[in-house]
Image (cartoon, rainbow, N blue to C red):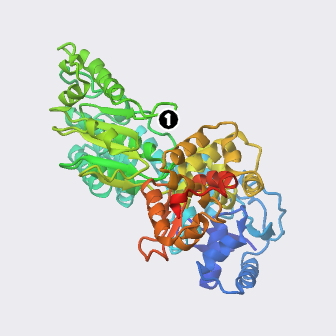
Amino acid sequence: MAVRFGILGPLHVLENGRAVDPGSRKQQILLAALLSHANTRVSADSLVEALWDDAPPRTARKNLQVYVSGLRRLAGPESGPDASCPGSGTGHATAPGATRISHQAGGYVLHTAEGELDALRFEQRARAGALTEALELWRGSALDGFRDVPLIDSAAQRLDRRFLGVFEDWLDAELAAGRGAEAIERATETAQRHPLRERLRMLQMTALCQAGRRSEALAVYDELRQTLAHELGLPPSPALARFYRSLLCEAGPVQARPAPPAELRPPPPRPHRPAAPNLLPTDPPAFTGRAVPVRRLAEVLTGGAGRLAVVTGPLGAGKTALAVHTAHRLAEHFPDGRLFVRLRGEDGRPRPLDDVLRQLLAVTACAERDGPTGAPPAAECSDPRWAWQLWLTGRRALVVVDDARRESEVRPLLPEAGESAVVVTARPGLIGLEGAHRVWLPPFTADEAVEFLGRTIGAERVDADRESAARIVRATGLLPLGVRLVADRLAFLRHVPLGEYVARLGGGRALLDELCGGDPLVRVRLAESVGELPEAAHWAVLRLGLLARPVFTLDRAAAVLDCDPGTAVRVLEDLLEASLLTVADAEGLAHTVRYEMPALLYAYARERAGRTADRVPVHLH
């Protein structure tokens, strides 16, 4: 019996070339989940969640075994590498005739060769450079009809992204061969399904230009610009904007293949002007997710009056990374420069305001001395505060102020006039900054954290054991700092399987010991964040480390703080303002609200709890 499976579109099963009914909806979900993770163990817990979401019956495990038995009868024994697909086979050692679905370490593996599953054939042909043949395997959106199941949807999204990458490579090759006109219809159809994919849009525009349809290519750019502004609050990338300008400036016949002018062709010459200063750190190379906060921040900074944003969140949430990443995307909105300044020195102490201002003025002075007018008047002023306001007057610059702790540190840096914008990163909410728009940055979602981990240690390593990868990032509380620490450690420990590392995180060694290794910097930052608090809040953080879990109610907090609920509320609200606690529920009565301490801070508090267990400030009572 020759069985073939298809997931590059609606799920289908073929036996000897004829369609087979895959069974009930539950059995189809199970089959789709196993096929989307072919040759990889999927835990029984994950399959139970996929089948019954958050409400599994008491007999869920037995029912799962029944569905697996049904699939074994449907799928038949494994046939081994398909002789019709040279070089297929997936490297697993199961012999032909063996059980196709095997039970391994608390989960199930569906074994299949490249000739039996279209997704594996697609990868094999794409790697071999047979892009046209690879794309012909697609029948629609991957696993269409099962995208409401998170386990399947995350795998389907990976397949969709892989399709787009291969399709763009195919289209690029067609353009190189001068066949852009023939590819327009297919490129346009795909671009309409993925309207925000900038590389695809650029290739579509190039194909239109090859066909002599320059005005339509320009219309594609205008449509993309409006869509980006509406959906994300962002402009097109500088590369695409340069390509658009090159089309506007071109005269004469269209070249056979204008791509890749966006990256290689210089922009049209402009009148000489001082270079716009740029103090931004490098855009974080592994920046992941955060679409909603990026859009919100961009909207504030590029809007009308009141372009002041405060990005707030717990230690390790990635506030600076978000501000820097967004600032890099907004270069064309701020032609007079993008500046970055830290309000803390390497030792964590506040920098004097005059030092901060002199750093900013020194950079602007260097930039303007390259212009025809010589040294700028602002740099020659004796009062740095007045000089800074003088420089901002009449300019449109973006200033990123990093790691503010109080409003008084920020106010002298805010423009009193002009069109400049300021984004401040701060753990406290800085509620005294009038007119500020606040962007709260929560931890990663589980999918974002796993994707970030894969970008550091390799997507193949993560895909081989996604369940363990998910457990690892959950152990860090999904905080980007924690995920980065664990990713850096795993990148070093290349020989350690992810499943083994999960056990290590759950063992006796403290979380901070495991993540930080010999680097004390994270503990120093945690100690600073706690040490700056008023005495009552300081001791409260350490006492909360005595709790068995980082999520707790007011009653539990009052008990461990040994004070009445009214006093406990005031202390907890101080910690909320300092972003050292979050509220798990958006609304609720005081006694039903669930508070949560970020994972790294909770680990630090637990380390210190034993030393402070018997010492409570008198004024907590």
Q: Quadrant of residue 146?
A: bottom right
Q: Is 17 situated left or right of 274 in this image?
A: right
Residue 246, x across and y down, in percent: 26, 34
* Quarter where residue 214 is shown: top left
Q: Position of residue 574 (x, y in %)?
A: 44, 58
Name the residue located 69 percent from the left edge and 72 percent from the top edge. Answer: 45
Q: Tell me which residue sits at (49%, 77%) in the image.
A: 592
Relative to 585, residue 131 above or below: above
The residue to which callout 1 is attached is 348
Quadrant of the rendering where the N terminus is positioned = bottom right
Q: Nearer the viewer, residue 247 or 379?
A: 379
User: Residue 87 location, x and y as percent?
Assistant: 72, 50
Work out whether 124 lies above or below 23: above
Q: What's the amino acid at mark 1? A: Gly
- How many marks are shown on the rendered structure? 1
Looking at the picture, does residue 69 appear above or below residue 129? below
- The residue located at (59%, 50%) in the rendering is 483
Q: Secondary structure at mark 1?
A: loop
Q: Is residue 201 left or right of residue 567?
A: left
Image location of residue 353, percent across then percent down: 34, 30
Q: Is residue 494 visible?
A: yes
The foreground one among 374 and 306 is: 306
